Image (spheres, rainbow, N blue to C red):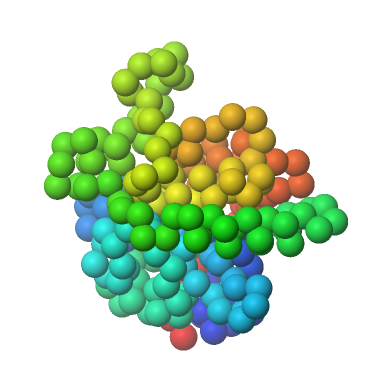
Amino acid sequence: MEKIKYSQIRPRLKTFDVLCCIPPGLFMGWIQHTVGVYVCAETGQISAYQSTTQKYAGKSGVSLTPMAEFVDRYIRAGGRILLRKCTIKGSGRRGRAQQDAAKHIKMHRGKPYPDLKTRAGRWYVVNARIDIPFWRKNPWVNQDRTDIFFCAHLIANEFRFCQLTKGKINAAEVDTRDLRAGGSFEDVLGDGVSLDYNEIQIIRG
C-alpha cells in the first residue's frame, strides 16, 4: 500500500474523498471509522466531516474539524488513515454536489452519535454490520434516522443527499466495511461517480 505524508496529499484532497480509518483498540478497531473530506469552496479550508465519540478524534457527534488537526491527533493516538479518492464525472455536477454538501453540514452539524452507554445505541451501530438480505423487513434493519448519526451512516447520507447515489439506499445500514475498497457502497454510487479502489495510507508529516 502506498504511503504519503499529509503535507504531500493535502493539495489533492477534494470534497467527497473518503477516509477509511482504523482506530486502536479491539472493539473500535473492529467497528472502524469513516470520515468525509470537505473542502470549503470559499476559503479552501480542508476539514474532516465526521460523527464520532472517540476522544482522540477530538470531537463528539457530527462535527467539522480542520483536517491537519484530525490527521495529527488520530495518528498520534495509534490510528491508521486510508484515503479513497472520489471521482465525479459530468459537467457542473461536482459544483452542484459541493453546494449540497455545504447544506448537509449546515443541517446536521452538532447532531449526536448514538449513545454507546445504552443497549439501543450500541445495537444501532453494530446492527449496520449485520447483513441478512432475506430479513429486510424485520427489526434487524436499522431505521434510517437523521437525528443521530454514526460515522458511515453520516457519509452515506451525505452522498445520497448530494445525489451521488442511485436507487433507494438506507444510509443507516451502510457500515464502515461497505466504504472500504471493494465494499458494497460502490454498487449504489451514481453513474459517473466512483471511489478509487487503491487505498492510500496518510502518514504524519
Residue at 74% of width from left, 62% of height from top?
A: 95
User: x, y percentage for residue 14?
Assistant: 63, 68
Answer yes or no: is residue 168 visible.
Answer: yes
Residue at 54% of width from left, 75% of height from top?
A: 46
User: x, y percentage for residue 31?
Assistant: 32, 47
Looking at the image, how many numbered discs can be counted on the residues?
A: 0
Q: Please state which of residues 73 and 29 is positioned toward the viewer in this rendering.
A: 73
Q: Is residue 189 above or below residue 195?
A: above
User: x, y percentage for residue 39?
Assistant: 59, 71
Q: Please state which of residues 63 and 195 is positioned toward the viewer in this rendering.
A: 63
Q: Is residue 46 above or below residue 106?
A: below
Residue at 37% of width from left, 35% of height from top?
A: 128
46 sits to left or right of 165: left
Q: Is residue 88 above or below residue 43?
A: above
User: x, y percentage for residue 153?
Assistant: 43, 45
112 sits to left or right of 36: left
Q: Is residue 165 above or below residue 15?
A: above
94 sits to left or right of 33: right
100 sits to left or right of 32: right
Residue at 56% of width from left, 79% of height from top?
A: 45
Answer yes or no: is residue 199 visible.
Answer: no
